[in-house]
Amino acid sequence: MPKIIVNNKEVEFEEGMTVLQACELAGEEIPRFCYHERLSIAGNCRMCLVEMEKSSKPIASCAMPAVDGMKIKTNTPFVDKARKGVMEFLLANHPLDCPVCDQGGECDLQDQSLFYGLDNSRYTENKRKVKEKYMGPLIKTIMTRCIHCTRCIRFATEVAGIPELGAVGRGEDTEITTYLEKSMESELSANVIDLCPVGALTSKPYAFESRPWDLKKTETIDVMDAVGSNIRVDTYGWEVKRVLPRVNEDINEEWISDKTRYACDGLLKQRLDTPYIRRDGRLQKASWSQALKLLISKIKSFHPNEIAGLVGDLTDLEMIYSFKLFLEKCVGSKNLECRQDRIYINPEERMNYIFNSSINGIEESDFILLVGTNPRLEATILNARIRKAYVKNKIKIYSIGDPGDLTYPYNNIGSSTSIIRNIVSGKHEIYTKIKKSKKPIIIIGESALYGKTGKYVFEELKNFLFNNNFIKKNWNSLNILTQHASRVGAIDVGAYLIDEKENFSFFDKLDNDDFKFVYLLGADNISFEKKDKFIVYQGSHGDKGAEIADIILPGAAYTEKNGLFVNLEGRCQSAYKASYPPGEAREDWIIFKDLANMMQKPLGYNNVQNLKEIIDKIIQSKINNEISKTNKVDFVEGNILVKPIDYYYTNSIARSSKVMSECRQISKKFLFTGIEKAS
Amino acid sequence: MTIKKISKIQPETFEFSKDNLLEVEKEVKKYPKEKKASAVIALLYLVQKQNDNWIPLAAIKYVAKLLGLPYIQIYEVCTFYSMFNLSPVGKYFVQVCTTTPCMISGAKKIVEICKKNISKNQNELSENKLCSWTEVECLGACVNAPMMQINQDYFEDLNENKTKEIIQTLLEDKMPTPGSAKNRKNTAPETGKTTLLEEKNA
């Protein structure tokens, strides 16, 4: 390996590294504004100047490739003077408004001026003033503060795949703007706020809310989609002030979607803070004992087979498992379902409902086939990975069903199930392409698994992959893209009702009015009519479920309890309590424990630790249980339609959020007037 | 100089004429297929030529689609170069050079004449909407200072009378003859050749 000498210390570095990266290997910190590990190199801020032997001028370390035997110095007076000069230029036009700037306390310019800034300015001229730009409901701009690092432009163009930002004008008059000041059209747009090293792009909903040092920071997991992005929740008292991404190279790198970041204001609105009972057709406040007593008497008045439970999309594993135990032990019912619609699942083995190739695996892949899925809206972060793989390796991407703009080019090869039959039987050109590729990925979305054709699509593709040896230990091409945070975990603990012949028997019974009592566990995306059913809703938000409920039990939202979530790859992650439930609301597993105790049929666990151990064992046994089984299926003629998704309104928290509503309004406008895509 | 303002009055559509489309083909051919975006400046010049010296938003979209580029990138190019106008400048666009050699030889007087005869401010249309003027940096014809450029042509060795005459012709919607006002050939000395007298083609 080549070697470089940094401050008289010799370090080995990898071929292709820049001087800045090599210096970091040597443990030297180099100040920078424009350089970012995940973006292309711009080299325009000049803050990373270092001294190189035999060079009379300082060099920009971020843009200079490291070469064997280079001698670099980073701590000489020469370097210090150069950086001080750069800083003086940057500050020449930067306003002195740190006291009213939202970036204060987490500002790169503030931090670095501590080391390289002069104590007073030598300029007597006026500072330049730049007009504010409109960039949508999420990004607040104070463009006078901009130092033109172009990180935001590079992010929008490279990572988000929506080249909407640009630097117009030149020299002193350069301004960063979107084309004609349109709102940014990307679901990843708010990441530019984190990228901005100064306070030019700040968060609009969080504007003037609090200072970073006043907030309590909790590292936890996101539940807005099934990706399970790692996030940090910042709270002030009870209020969740903001959500920021946490680096996890295996999942979200360091980006999060706008929904993850900004649905948090929904945690403060529409909350259920006390139990309600429907009396004379109206929901009225009640106490816990009243509500639970009524609930138990109602349960006793129905036959166990008439009682059903429906698990929602944001529920954690503890909740689902204690619900399942409650239904089985206390009620004696097996009617439990985690799907809210007729989406085919095959829970025989774990690989049948998870994303087996893993999110990291996308980058290694050389062929991607999307089947009835729109990853951009269903799993934004995963889509960013596919785009990364496309940009890096120029892989070919095909789609069955038309998902619309995915931020990268793909070939739509039709939408009929007969295409799958052709591929499997070798009549379609895709067949040879899959056979030739080393690590193909087939992503099956929920739209493809919907209804009658679901079983055929899934089983046939699995058979095909299995027979062609693409389901192996080191590479599994079969991927299911679930949309909801609770889904994989719920299937793991067995929250489904499947007959041998009929995958949707729960929904058949529901439609035939076999159920007279339905217990909704945070289930809001319901697709059945109430009629004369008795409905209990337990959850955090007054949404669709609570609307039709006869008894409402207030529960905790995802930031208010410790909980396990299994993401779409089958990765089990714990979420931590950042805040506490409002009013009289309780953590959900405690509600079931109380109910069971009141019915004198204890559930067999005493504390949450106990419960976690049981769940852990179940998941481990699922992982270890390796069988590769295939089922033969008959061809079913049908169309695979990628279902439209109301992206900003997919769950009860997002629906309660004012920011999400604003985004939704604007995204609707895109459809009518939106920027048509060039080429 | 601040960022150019986009005109509020915009034509609905823009399309290249048949002749210009042939030109476009020539320009795009100069570059490898995957690098056809390189032709952007040439294409924007063609737009200005066809559309009375300015680029409407419709043309930005049109060129973007032609070259497979995002709109913002074309917009960046348009704002970066001072030679591109984003609001109407008239059928006759007068650019007066005011850099040192021209300034010494009387460019300020020419500017005064423009102010008087065309419009009070730079980049403002004359009353009959045919003409506008602007000060520009060196146009590279210092030997024949003072000079100005009207559309594609240079008018050199100007004096006050000649300038007035030229601008009057423009306002009457006629194009004056370009070249030196002192009738010299290119940059040859005013009094005729002094060297290489025996060379015929020198």
Image (cartoon, coloured by chain):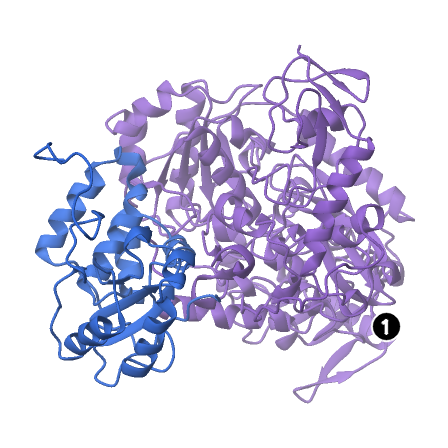
Chain colours: A purple, B blue
Residue tagged 1: A584
Q: On the image, which quarter does residue A635 sit in?
A: top left
Q: Residue A446: horizontal and vertical position, in percent?
A: 47, 48
Q: On the image, which quarter does residue A323 sit in?
A: bottom right
Is B198 placed left or right of A314 in the picture? left
Q: Chain of mark 1?
A: A
Front residue of B53/B99: it is B99
Q: Residue at x 59, y 43 (%)?
A: A44
The secondary structure type at the circle numbered 1 is loop
Q: Residue A22: horizontal and vertical position, in percent?
A: 70, 24
- Residue A63 sits above or below residue A68 on the image: below
Q: Residue A621: horizontal and vertical position, in percent?
A: 72, 29
Residue furthest to the bottom in view is A280
Front residue of A356/A248: it is A248
Front residue of A347/A595: it is A347
- Residue A131 sits above or below residue A400 on the image: below
Where, quadrant-wise, is the C terminus of chain B in this rendering? Answer: top left
